Every structure is written in C-alpha cells, then in structure tokens.
Amino acid sequence: MWQAELVKARLNDHGFSVEIEIIHTTGDKIQDKTLAEAGGTKALFVKEIEEALLDGRVDVAVHSLKDVPAEIPEGLVLSAIPEREDPRDVLIGRLEAGARIGTSSLRRAAQLRARFPGVIVEPLRGNLDTRIRRLDEGRWDGIVVANAGVNRLGLEARITRPFSIEEMCPAIGQGALAIEVRSGDARADFLDHAETRAAVTAERTVMRLLGGGCRLPVGALAFFLRNTMHIRAVVASPDGTKLVKVSDQGGSPEELGSRVSYALLAQGAADILAAL
C-alpha cells in the first residue's frame, strides 16, 4: 500500500486522477508455508494483478521488482523502474551462535548458514508488521528483512544492523519498484530512473540465465561507481556449505549479467542448481 500510494501521488502530480484497487495475490494468501514450499514461482505475487491489467480492470500495476518474473506476459511492459531504495538486508533482533533467526527466503537462509555457522534458521511469513510482532512475542531471536521495507514504514529504529552486500547479497531487484502497464501505454514513463533500470536489467539477466526464482538461493546486486556498472552475484546451497560468488564490471547491462551468469555456472553454481 505504501508503494501504491507513492505511485498514486506521483501520477496525481502529473495531472492523472487515480484510484487504488487492492488485489490479493496467491502469495499474499499463503501464510502457512514458505514460498518454495508453495511452488516457488515468482508469479505468486503478480499473476492476479497482471490478469487485471490484461482484462482492463486496472491500468497501472505496482510491484516489488524482486517479485516480477524474468519473462513479462505478452501485452504488458515494465513502463518504469523508479529510483531504487537501499537494497540491503537488515537484522532486527540478535544474531549469535545458537540464535533462532526467522526468514522465508532460501537466499537469506543459505547465506546466513554460510556466514554465521551455529545459527538456527526458521521459516516465517507475513507482512513486516506481523514479522516484527512475532519477533517481539519471542518466536525468534532475530529476523532478516529488506531494508527498503523497514525504511518505507518508518521502522528504522528497530534495525540492529544492516548486512553488507559481501555478507548477504540481496535478492535480484530488491529495493526497486516495477510499474507495469499494457503495451503502448506511456502514462507512467516519467517515473523511470535510467540508472536503476540499467542496474536491475543486469541483475534480471542473471536471474533469467540461471532460472532464478523463490526456490533458488540466488542473489545479485548491480550498482554504479564512477560511471561504471559493477555487479556482485552469489549462488549458495540451501545448507550453506557451498557458496559461489562472482564480481565483475563494465559493458552493457545484458553483457555484464551474462558474463556473471556464465562465470557462476563455471565456478560451481551449475552443480548447486542441478541438485535443486
């Protein structure tokens, strides 16, 4: 809702009359199992919304980009990728040997096990408020969540520590929004942020070539330093015993993402993914 209200305000500023239509997706409704257990497809959070777009029931869809599959349905386009929020993951609570850490993400769980041996990773679902409430009730010692969501809801004071991208490589597209419309509709184009779009294009190239989804512990983050794009990507086994990481820079977003994907596969990611 925060994301939808932000886009509504920006469209209002450009003279559009906007009403918000709330659509509950399959991913919203599944609360008793992890996304991997539910099938792991990234379309869990977008399918019903894209159907509403194609049917003409809504005109603009607002997604968290990390929920959007690599392939967009025919007739739809990602019209805008606004400027990205902080893409890092953060810890709320305690992280120490023997601590029970809640996360629904295989990517986070795998990297936690690899970087912090001795922690006990347990599944959790629900929106951010629900997760923090359950943490406060003592279900876990800590939870790992996206910094962007914490910032958007004004809960920065609850953060114990942010993870560096070396400790916890973010999900592909984390911290970015995706504005999806029907092909040929340019009403939201002005929201696009070129640098963010280039970065997430490189990351989504990695996702497409590795077949990444909620079932795969794959992370990638692209960013610019002195006008050159850099990228860091990770593939980890769910138990954290194998961690393949690659960094690269330069070239077009697609070229950079492709090079990193093939390097990951060559250095051992192929075996991890085949086992999954």
Image (spheres, rainbow, N blue to C red):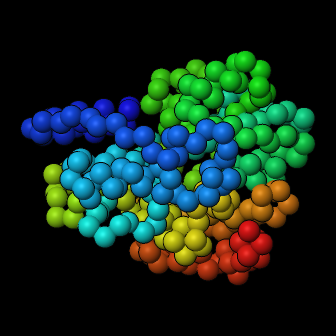
82 relative to 2, above or below: below
The answer, for residue 30, to whether it is visible in the render is yes
Residue in front for this viewpoint, 160 or 271: 271
- On screen, residue 118 versus residue 206, left or right, reads right
Residue at x 74% of width, y 30% of height: 142
Residue 21's spot in the image, x, y percent? 29, 37
Residue at x 67% of width, y 29% of height: 92
- On screen, residue 139 versus residue 3, left or right, reads right
Residue at x 24% of width, y 47% of height: 58
Residue at x 55% of width, y 32% of height: 127
Residue 23's spot in the image, x, y percent? 37, 41
Residue in front for this viewpoint, 145 or 202: 145
Quarter of the image where the N terminus is located: top left
212 relative to 63, above or below: below
**Occupied quadrant, residue 274:** bottom right
Residue 25's spot in the image, x, y percent? 45, 45
Q: How many marks?
A: 0
Q: Residue furthest top?
A: 137
Residue 37's spot in the image, x, y percent? 68, 53
- On screen, residue 219 versus residue 14, left or right, reads right
Quarter of the image where the C terminus is located: bottom right
180 relative to 212, above or below: above
The answer, for residue 195, to whether it is visible in the render is no
82 relative to 144, above or below: below
